[in-house]
Image: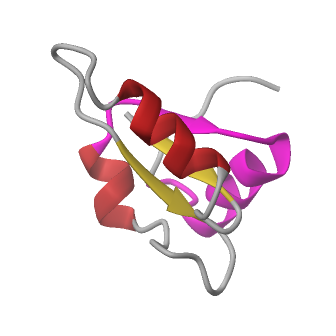
Amino acid sequence: MLFVCAQNRLRSPTAESIFRDVDGWEVASAGTNRDPEVPVSRDLLEWADVAVCMEKRHRDILRQRFRGRCRTTGS
């Protein structure tokens, strides 16, 4: 599971930390902005079974940046 926010400094790393110890889950976090701690990449999206975006705009950025490379759900 990949948690995504803008800077990858607060929200997504916090979610990663909370879920890190859940048995059977592999988690990571990344950011969509130009200077995140860990930038979201095609490799991370392909690794993740699910990407959880903190805001709708993050999902929209993923859809635009990785058009055709990732499947998204929701409106």
The front one of 22 and 41 is 22
Quarter of the rendering containing residue 26: top left
Residue at left 47%, top 47%?
70
Quarter the C terminus occupies: top right
Question: Which x, y percent locates residue 15?
Answer: 53, 36
In the image, is residue 15 above or below residue 30? above
The front one of 39 and 8 is 8
Residue at left 51%, top 54%?
68
Question: Which x, y percent locates residue 28?
Answer: 35, 47
- As drawn, the residue found furthest toward the top would be 23
Question: Which x, y percent locates residue 39?
Answer: 49, 73
Number of marks drawn:
0
Quarter the N terminus occupies: top left
On the picture, is 25 further left or further right than 19? left
In the image, is residue 45 above or below residue 19? below
Is 57 one of the magenta-colored residues? Answer: yes
Question: Which x, y percent locates residue 7?
Answer: 66, 68
Residue at left 43%, top 40%?
16
On the picture, is 36 further left or further right than 22? right
Q: How is the image coloured?
A: secondary structure
On the picture, is 43 further left or further right than 9? left
Residue at left 26%, top 24%?
21
Is 26 one of the magenta-colored residues? Answer: no
In the image, is residue 12 above or below residue 61? above
The front one of 17 and 41 is 17
- As drawn, the residue found furthest toward the bottom would be 35
Q: What span is in magenta?
A: 48-69
